[in-house]
């Protein structure tokens, strides 16, 4: 890599911080683009043979004793029983719970993490894990391989991820995959805001609002996703007794 303004070769973290600092020499922009490119390629190679996934979003801060942890664990279990690979951000909390449930049900469990100072050590229930240096690359991986999205309670990151998925569906950049918000008590105020303000003020259409499915039942969520996979997207089990893999018709 080239040298920074001080004449010293930047560290990886320094390169990332400089990414949004304004105009830079053209060699810097080229090297940054190459870093992004190889980060994407690494993810594509790691996840190419996964089979259809369902991505579960949620907070890294939820402890094992919390009811939401159990809810996510049950969701991962039900998805794995339906033959899906469970994909998460690979960290602790809700992510760990979903991966753990998938592992307990004998399903595949993968994670796509992000390099952060806190919260993002990979959980121990992953069959495969990669770590990204960029949030937008991570979100690409979490969306690219999934046939549905489940959001459990979370913070800014969870909201960012779920609204990214909904925006891509709304604009036709990806297909109309199911989007499930699991935990009606937590998501209720947000649903009320979207219906009473966004729809009422016509900043979104009622059809956009109707894309979101709210439930407290992991079993219902998994059933809806399974039905959509079969009826809407033409997926079929390659090995029916094991309910492990899907194929296109």
Image: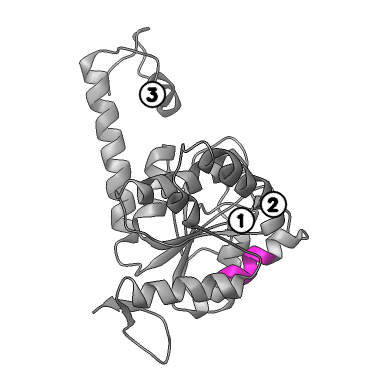
Q: Secondary structure at mark 1?
A: loop
Residue 93 drawn above or below residue 234: above
The residue pinned by badge 2 equals 186
Query: Real-space Cα distance between discs 2 and 3?
Result: 38 Å
Q: Earlier in the sequence, mark 3 or mark 1?
A: 3
The residue pinned by badge 3 equals 15
Count of number-bearing discs: 3
Residue placed most toward the observer, 151 or 80: 151
Side of 112 relative to 92 (left or right): left
In the picture as drawn, the residue positioned furthest to the bottom comes out as 241
**Crowdedness near tag 3: few (<14), some (14–19) or many (≥20) residues, C-alpha within 10 Å:** some
**Crowdedness near tag 2: few (<14), some (14–19) or many (≥20) residues, C-alpha within 10 Å:** some
Query: Real-space Cα distance between discs 3 and 1?
Result: 33 Å
Residue at (35, 67) in percent of width and height? 50
Q: Secondary structure at mark 2?
A: helix
Residue interval drawn in magenta: 71-76
Magenta segment, principal secondary structure? helix
Q: Earlier in the sequence, mark 2 or mark 3?
A: 3
The residue pinned by badge 1 equals 152
Residue 89 drawn above or below residue 133: below
Whether residues under marks 2 and 1 lie with C-beta atoms below 8 angstroms apart, the answer is yes
């Amino acid at each position: 890599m080239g040298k920074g303004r001080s004449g010293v070769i930047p560290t990886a973290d320094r390169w990332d911080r400089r990414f949004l600092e304004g105009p830079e020499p053209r060699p810097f922009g080229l090297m940054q683009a190459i870093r992004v490119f190889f980060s994407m390629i690494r993810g594509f190679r790691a996840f190419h043979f996964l089979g259809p996934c369902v991505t579960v979003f949620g907070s890294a801060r939820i402890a094992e004793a919390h009811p939401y942890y159990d809810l996510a664990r049950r969701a991962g279990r039900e998805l794995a029983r339906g033959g899906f690979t469970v994909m998460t951000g690979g960290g602790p909390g809700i992510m760990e719970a979903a991966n753990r449930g998938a592992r307990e049900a004998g399903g595949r469990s993968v994670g796509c993490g992000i390099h952060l100072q806190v919260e993002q050590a990979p959980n121990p229930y992953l069959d495969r894990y990669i770590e990204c240096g960029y949030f937008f690359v991570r979100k690409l991986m979490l969306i690219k391989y999934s046939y549905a999205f489940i959001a459990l309670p979370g913070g800014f990151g969870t909201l960012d991820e779920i609204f990214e998925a909904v925006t891509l569906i709304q604009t036709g950049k990806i297909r109309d995959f199911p989007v499930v918000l699991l935990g009606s008590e937590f998501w209720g105020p947000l649903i009320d805001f979207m219906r009473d303000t966004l729809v009422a003020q016509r900043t979104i259409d009622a059809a956009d609002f109707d894309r979101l499915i709210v439930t407290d039942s992991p079993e219902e969520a998994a059933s809806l996703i399974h039905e959509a996979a079969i009826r809407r997207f033409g997926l079929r089990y390659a090995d029916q007794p094991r309910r492990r893999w899907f194929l296109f018709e």
